[in-house]
Image (cartoon, rainbow, N blue to C red):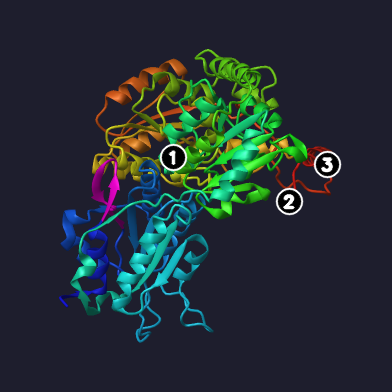
């Protein structure tokens, strides 16, 4: 047997470089590269091997370990889980910085490979720099903290373990039902140890994503339930994108005349103006989608984990005990939620076989006419509030403090600028804060797969790092990042990364004076403004940040605008620029897109505040509509 003598780190790099995948009709490297910040725990061994690998496994320098791992998550999303980036850190704080990104990947069912240095397997030098000691368990290191937030976890304690561990990690990340992040800890001494590996382990391997077909019995039950529906509804989740099932979804909906609503992750599964697209569902959803959900009798949930923002904390499906959910999902765990009829299968193949089993079934025309009527009202509402000269609509959530913000643009108007200027190449990205609700409603994509809103984990700071990763994955597309001042201040250093690497973004920074959307929630549940807006926090002076000047200091082109008209002009300049372009503007902290559904949050049962007591009573009343243990 032919062997090759490599260190454990050399085996890791050689194995990753040899993996290929079928994507877009081509065979391409599965691992497009490695994001790396080096320290004593990974620079001398893994870092050396990455340098030797060169273009076979390109290394990209990050500015913050969390940021580079978030960029890797966004890269996988933009590639619809077909390609993966790895991220490596030293031991200690570098490793634990990546835990949040691992949780983002876990919640969003995204592949991400994390390679962190670890303490010495021999324990002879202990305690080493950055080691956290556990007096009663010397085997425990901070890397064990990754266990709850990854699908696969391993620590290599002998070099020969590396390839089997990596194989298990890769197979996990490519499994459509179990997809998620993988972590491998690399003790410093083991990284340096050599072993005679079989040469065949490093031969080129081409992977294909498995497409599980539905069980015949589950298929019959699902088809029978849907064929009996008078008011069927499809909920399109992120799994539609990950399965490349957009065309199959559109065909299925058209043949069977079934309206479609979209989750946050499933947004742009259909183009916005498709006659059966009723818009986004749930807490950040629109009136049309939620109205259809309230009357649906059979709900086909495709590729969604049915989180509370989709289900309105399980109040949005209003048909009582007679509502039947069909869970079409590659993951059994998601397909069976709330006593759904499971259809465990790949979304594309499942829709195709379910469509064949349905035969000539079509939903009644009066049901789709209702959908069309509701949806036209939704679009008219968005057109109104997103207009350049829009005023606050009747019933808006303006607070008494709004008079200080009355002349400032709203988030809806900012989104409207991007929506009107976009073409089929535009890819919009956002995350936590106020933008999810505004973009999910106001971004009406002209192309499928044109939207990434990280709301599985709702991670502030994802936006700019994620934009970097998305642009790496989609170099020909215009990636537009919308971010609030709160998220910008949490994590912005990858603006510098985009300048250094030439991955141009358009970044719009909306400054509404703090964490305005949480201030909204605080007020809505009977609270008083406290510690969310900067003006309501314990500060000596509410100093304004010059976001444009800050971005310019990192090499971006940047400007500050004061109106929607100025934003539109600046957006045109940003599109013409050849480098990351940041546009900053002050926005209204009190006016938001209306709609959505009930959302359960904790409101005190006992309080001295009459407003809090009233909010608790309202919460209890709304909870009466919840479904428990369907």
Q: Is residue 38 above or below residue 63?
A: below
Left or right of 251, for residue 6: left
Determine which residue is flagged by label 1: 241
Determine which residue is flagged by label 2: 629
For the residues labelled 3 and 2, the Cα–Cα distance comes to 28 Å
Whether residue 118 is visible: yes
Determine which residue is flagged by label 3: 613
For the residues labelled 2 and 1, the Cα–Cα distance comes to 29 Å
Discs 3, 2 touching: Cβ within 8 Å: no
Left or right of 37, for residue 363: right
Q: In the rendered view of the protein, which quadrant contains the N terminus?
A: bottom left
Residue 232: x percent and y percent? 63, 31
Q: Earlier in the sequence, mark 3 or mark 2?
A: 3
Comparing 518 with 261, the one in front is: 261
Q: Nearer the viewer, mark 3 or mark 2?
A: 2
Whether residue 594 is visible: no
Q: How many numbered marks does the figure carry?
A: 3
Discs 3, 1 touching: Cβ within 8 Å: no
Q: Is residue 203 above or below residue 447?
A: below
Write down the region rendered in magenta: 20-36
Q: Main secondary structure of the magenta part?
A: strand
Residue 296: x percent and y percent? 68, 31
Residue 448: x percent and y percent? 41, 30
Bin the neighbour count of mark 3 within 10 Å (Cα to Cα): few under 14, some 14-19, many 20 and up: some
């Amino acid at each position: 047997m032919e062997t090759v003598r490599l260190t454990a780190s050399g085996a890791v790099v050689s194995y990753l470089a040899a993996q290929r995948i079928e994507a877009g009709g081509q065979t391409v490297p599965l691992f497009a590269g490695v994001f790396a910040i080096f320290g004593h725990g990974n620079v001398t061994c893994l870092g050396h091997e990455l340098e030797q690998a060169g273009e076979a496994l390109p290394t990209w320098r990050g500015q913050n370990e969390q940021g580079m791992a978030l960029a890797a998550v966004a890269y996988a999303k933009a590639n619809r889980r077909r390609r993966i980036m790895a991220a490596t850190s030293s031991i200690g704080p570098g490793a634990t910085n990546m835990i949040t990104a691992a949780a983002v990947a876990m919640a969003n069912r995204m592949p991400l490979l994390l390679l962190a240095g670890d303490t010495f397997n021999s324990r002879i030098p202990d305690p080493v720099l950055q080691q956290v000691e556990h007096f009663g368990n010397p085997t425990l290191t901070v890397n064990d903290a990754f266990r709850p937030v990854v699908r696969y976890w391993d620590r290599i304690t002998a070099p020969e373990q590396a390839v089997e561990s990596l194989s298990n990690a890769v197979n996990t990340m490519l499994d459509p039902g179990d997809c998620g992040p993988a972590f491998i800890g690399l003790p410093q001494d083991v990284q340096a140890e050599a072993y005679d590996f079989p040469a065949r382990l490093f031969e080129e391997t081409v992977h294909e994503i498995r497409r599980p077909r539905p069980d015949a019995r589950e298929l019959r039950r699902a088809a029978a339930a849907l064929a009996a529906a008078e008011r069927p509804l499809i909920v399109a989740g992120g799994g539609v994108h990950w399965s490349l099932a957009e065309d199959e979804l559109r065909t299925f909906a058209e043949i069977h005349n079934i309206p479609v609503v979209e989750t946050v992750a499933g947004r742009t599964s259909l183009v916005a103006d498709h006659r059966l697209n009723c818009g986004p569902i749930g807490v950040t959803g629109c009136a049309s989608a939620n109205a259809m959900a309230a009357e649906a009798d059979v709900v086909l949930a495709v590729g969604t984990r049915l989180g509370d923002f989709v289900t309105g904390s399980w109040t949005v499906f209003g048909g009582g005990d007679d509502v039947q959910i069909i869970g079409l999902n590659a993951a059994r765990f998601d397909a069976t939620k709330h006593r759904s009829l499971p259809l465990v299968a790949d979304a594309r193949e499942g829709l195709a076989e379910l469509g064949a089993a349905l035969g000539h079934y079509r939903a009644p025309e009066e049901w789709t006419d209702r959908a069309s009527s509701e949806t036209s009202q939704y679009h008219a509402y968005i057109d109104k509030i997103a207009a350049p000269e829009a005023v606050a609509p009747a019933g808006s959530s303006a607070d008494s403090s709004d008079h200080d913000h009355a002349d400032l643009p709203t988030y809806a108007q900012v989104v409207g600028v991007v929506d009107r200027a976009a073409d089929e190449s535009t890819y919009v990205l956002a995350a936590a804060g106020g933008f999810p609700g505004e973009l999910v409603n106001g971004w009406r994509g002209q192309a499928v797969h044109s939207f990434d809103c990280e709301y599985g984990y709702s991670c502030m700071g994802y936006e700019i790092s994620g934009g970097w990763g998305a642009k790496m994955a989609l170099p020909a597309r215009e990636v537009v990042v919308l971010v609030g001042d709160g998220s910008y201040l949490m994590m912005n250093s990858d603006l510098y990364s985009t300048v250094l690497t030439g991955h141009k973004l358009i970044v719009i920074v909306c400054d509404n004076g703090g964490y305005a959307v949480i201030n909204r929630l605080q007020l809505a549940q009977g609270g008083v403004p406290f510690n969310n807006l900067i003006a309501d926090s314990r500060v000596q002076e509410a100093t304004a940040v010059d976001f444009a000047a800050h971005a310019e200091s990192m090499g971006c082109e940047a400007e500050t605008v004061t109106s929607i008209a100025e934003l539109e002009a600046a957006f045109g300049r940003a599109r013409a620029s050849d480098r990351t372009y940041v546009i900053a503007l002050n926005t209204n902290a009190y006016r938001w897109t209306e709609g959505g559904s009930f959302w359960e949050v904790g409101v005190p049962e006992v309080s001295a505040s009459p407003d809090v007591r009233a909010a608790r009573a309202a919460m209890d009343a709304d909870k009466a509509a919840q479904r428990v243990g369907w």
